[in-house]
Image: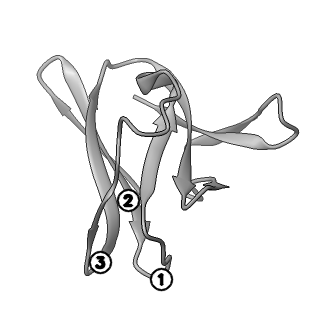
Amino acid sequence: MLKKRLEGTVVRVTFNIPAPLTAQTITLVGEFNNWSETATPLLRSGEGWSTTMDLPPNHSFQYRYLADGRWLNDWSADRYEPNEFGGANSVVYT
């Protein structure tokens, strides 16, 4: 689930995956972190996994989750775009 809130000159976006997903590690990978597979880990809590990023307003960013080596889309993304691997990337609009 995506939660967005304008705070000054940035949009604070919380990326959240519900608790039923079990994994050792999950990272957020996307245009906002140069598709780094290690830069933005999600933290686990009783409610699931989440991380928050401050992004510039009026932009769109493609992203995916990497859970124990498996690529996952965000089912609450604002939309999806085809990627070069024959799948689709999630997209968030700020």
Question: Mark 1 highlights which residue?
Answer: 20
In this view of the protein, which residue sits in the foreground, 60 or 37?
37
- Judging from the image, what secondary structure is the residue with disc 2 in? strand
Q: Quadrant of the C terminus?
A: top left
Chain-order first, disc 3 or disc 2: 2
Residue beneath disc 3: 47
User: Exactly how many numbered labels are in the figure?
Assistant: 3
What amino acid type is highlighted by mark number 2?
Asn
Q: Is residue 51 left or right of residue 75?
A: left
Real-space Cα separation, disc 1 to disc 3, in angstroms: 9 Å
Tag 3 and tag 2, C-beta contact below 8 Å: yes
Say above or below: 77 vs 46: above
Q: Residue at x 55, y 37 (%)?
A: 63
- Which quarter of the figure has residue 79? top right
Q: Indicate the position of residue 46 as horizontal and vertical percent values.
A: 25, 81
| Element marked by disc 3 | loop
What amino acid type is highlighted by mark number 3? Glu
Earlier sequence position, callout 1 versus callout 3: 1
Q: Nearer the viewer, residue 15 or 45?
A: 45
Visible residue check, residue 77:
no
- Which residue is depicted at the point 27% across and 36% down? 53
Which element type, helix, strand or loop, lies under badge 1?
A: loop
How would you rate the neighbour count of disc 1 (Cα within 10 Å): few for under 14, some for 14-19, many for 20 or more?
Answer: few
Q: Position of residue 37 (x, y in %)?
A: 49, 38
Look at label 1 and name its amino acid: Pro
Q: Which mark is residue 16?
A: 2
Quarter placement of the N terminus = bottom left
Q: CA distance from mark 1 to mark 2?
A: 12 Å
- How many C-alpha atoms fall within 10 Å of the one at disc 2: few (<14), some, or many (≥20)? many
The 10 Å Cα crowd at callout 3, few under 14, some 14 to 19, many 20 or more, is few
Residue 55 located left or right of residue 17? left
Colour convention:
one colour
